[in-house]
Every structure is written in structure tokens, then in C-alpha cells.
Image (cartoon, helix red, strand yellow):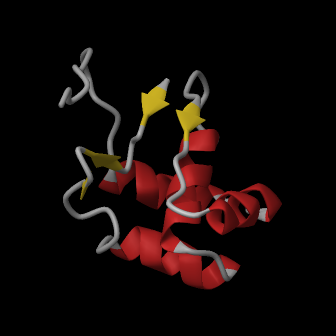
Amino acid sequence: MAYRPMAQAGQLRQGLLESEAVRSAASAHGATLSQILLFFLLSRKGVLPIPRASRPEHTVENAAAQIRLSPEELSALDHTFPAPQKKTKLDVV
């Protein structure tokens, strides 16, 4: 489970939206950067992202998005955002 994987305490995680892998995939799919990150998490076995949207329209946009990331895109995202090698505590505020 990934609880608010993009932000904790209202702060975006360092480097998420500046990543060339995220920007390239978003451009290729006509998607938002946040949608690419959401679909990246959805592609992970055993990961259940719980997205939060600041506006109801974002929830509708995310639900309507039909994005299939290519193996190359997934590899680039995996390289940019490697999975932790050990259990990692969530930020608690």
C-alpha cells in the first residue's frame, strides 16, 4: 500500500515532477505528471495507491485516464524511483 505517495504533510516529494522519465511519459501519453505517477504505482504488483485529489475534477480525470506505460517507460521510472530495499516508515505528521 502506498499512502499519499506523492506528498506528505502537504509537501511534494523531492524531484517527482522534475523527473525526465515522468515528463517524457506524460508528453507521450497526453497525460498529467500526476497521472503518470499514479499509473506507475498501479503497475506495481502488491501496491495499492490511494490517490488524493485537491479537486473533484482531478478524481474524474484520473478515473477516466487510460494509460498503458511501455516496458521502456516503466524501466525508466523504476530507475528514477527505485523501490526501497527494506521496510520504510511513512512520514507521520
Residue 1, given in percent of the width and then of the height, sits at: 49, 23
Residue 67, given in percent of the width and then of the height, sits at: 74, 62
Picture quarter with the C terminus: top left
Residue under the image location 54 percent in, 43 percent down: 41
Residue under the image location 49 percent in, 71 percent down: 33
Residue under the image location 24 percent in, 54 percent down: 13
Residue 7, given in percent of the width and then of the height, sits at: 32, 49
Answer left or right for 53 relative to 62.
Answer: left
> Is there any visible trace of residue 68 in the rendered image?
no
Q: Is residue 16 above or below residue 18?
A: above
Residue under the image location 37 percent in, 50 percent down: 6
> Is there any visible trace of residue 64 in the rendered image?
yes
Q: Is residue 32 above or below residue 88?
A: below
| Quadrant assignment, res 63 | bottom right
* Pick the front one: 24 or 7: 7
Q: How many marks?
A: 0
Q: Is residue 42 above or below residue 12?
A: above
